[in-house]
Amino acid sequence: MRIKIIIILLTFSLILPFSQTAQAANLSKQYFDITENDLKNSIIMSPQSSKAFIDGNMVSAVQPIVKDGRTLVPLRFISEGFGAKVDFNAKSNTITIKHSGKSIALKIGDKALAVNGKHIQMDVAANLYHNSTYIPLRYIGEAFDKKVVYLKNENIQPYSLIIIRDVNATALENLNLVRLCELLYQGKSVVYSDRFMAVIKEKGQLFYSNDFSYFKPFVYQEFVEDKNVVKLGDLWFKTDRGNFYMDYAYATTGEFILYYVDGQDISRVAIEKAPIKAVKTYQNNVYFLTRYERGVVNAHETSNLKYATLKNGQWVSDYLGKPGFYYGFDTLANPYNWKIDDNGIYIFGYNRFGNLSSDERKETFGNYRIDLEGHNHEVVNP
């Protein structure tokens, strides 16, 4: 009788499909820099959690285990996660997996694994734990021609992550995507995240973090100029359309990132190499100036006056005016006022970059009317 009960439990654990699990989060919707194609044919798990991500969707899972220094993963869950068909023979205790013309066979309690008839000797035998069949992580990954990545850093990661992915899907190892997974494993309510920052909601309030670990309130704060303090990031701009936030990725890329913030609706407007010093809105577009404090590569091919417009749910930006021109600031970096109407942008500017003598550059000083789109301008008051 006891043998029959064990067989029934074993059969149940092998038959239970992962499709019965409930979706709780979607990485491609919460992480701006990752697409559904990046996540396709991937599984992310953690030995510290009974949740997993299949193709970016969080589902309930059979939890991986670490035993005697080996990481073991649930065979059926992994196999069906990749769309394979799994059959169990209770009489012989053998499991057969069919996937994309490939046949994988093994026996519970045995170290042998056969892939298309080719026998591989595993260092640990397939065994039952918690009524599910487990095998070493590396072998199931290789059997499906996948890359297996195990990320563990006890100093900064409360969760170790197992990534089983297509060989070329390297985007999944982005450090901040890993941090996002950790936040979701912790049950955090993630409002927005990309490779630069994450925004979560707790007790009705938004908090943000650049390192995905230390969070502080994400609310508009009026910037008060202080001659003794140079503040490059963590700046807010109030416009007729709403609030914009500029982040400075000082610890990674050194770039300046502009976000549109409308309550919990957060979207990335632009990424710039130079600090963003002014933001205006007109009709459905966003216009902003950058200040070349440290120089910009190929500055003669662009200008520091930019605009961004929303297309198909994403912001697309381009420079305005003539390439090589520097608008809105004088030679000492002092700002000028500028305005926008239906006819264009009215702003001071001069040709800062190019093979011009000092006198030739001074001749370009003047007030310009710049088209709202394109790369044209005209002098309106030399």
Image (tube, rainbow, N blue to C red):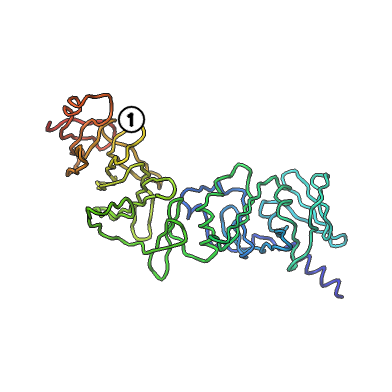
For the residue pair 39 and 359, the one nearer the viewer reads as: 359
User: Against 23, is 112 above or below?
Assistant: above
Which quadrant would residue 107 be assigned to in this image? bottom right
Q: Position of residue 325 (x, y in %)?
A: 25, 32
* Residue 72 visible in rendering: no
* Residue 265 visible in rendering: yes
The quadrant of the rendering that contains the N terminus is bottom right
Read off the residue under disc 1.
301
Question: Residue at coordinates 28% horizontally, 55% vertically from top-left?
Answer: 242
User: Against 243, is 129 above or below?
Assistant: below
Q: Position of residue 359 (x, y in %)?
A: 17, 25
Extreme residue in the bottom direction: 1
Question: Residue at coordinates 17% horizontally, 44% vertically from top-left?
Answer: 337
The quadrant of the rendering that contains the C terminus is top left
User: Against 97, is 300 above or below?
Assistant: above
Relative to 288, 134 lies left or right: right
Describe the element under mark 1 as helix, strand or loop.
helix
Q: Position of residue 255 (x, y in %)?
A: 38, 45
Relative to 236, 107 lies left or right: right
User: Against 355, is 164 above or below?
Assistant: below
Badge 1 crowding class, 10 Å Cα cut-off, few under 14, some 14 to 19, many 20 or more, is few
Q: Exactly how many numbered labels are in the figure?
A: 1
| Amino acid tagged 1 | Glu
For the residue pair 314 and 269, the one nearer the viewer reads as: 269
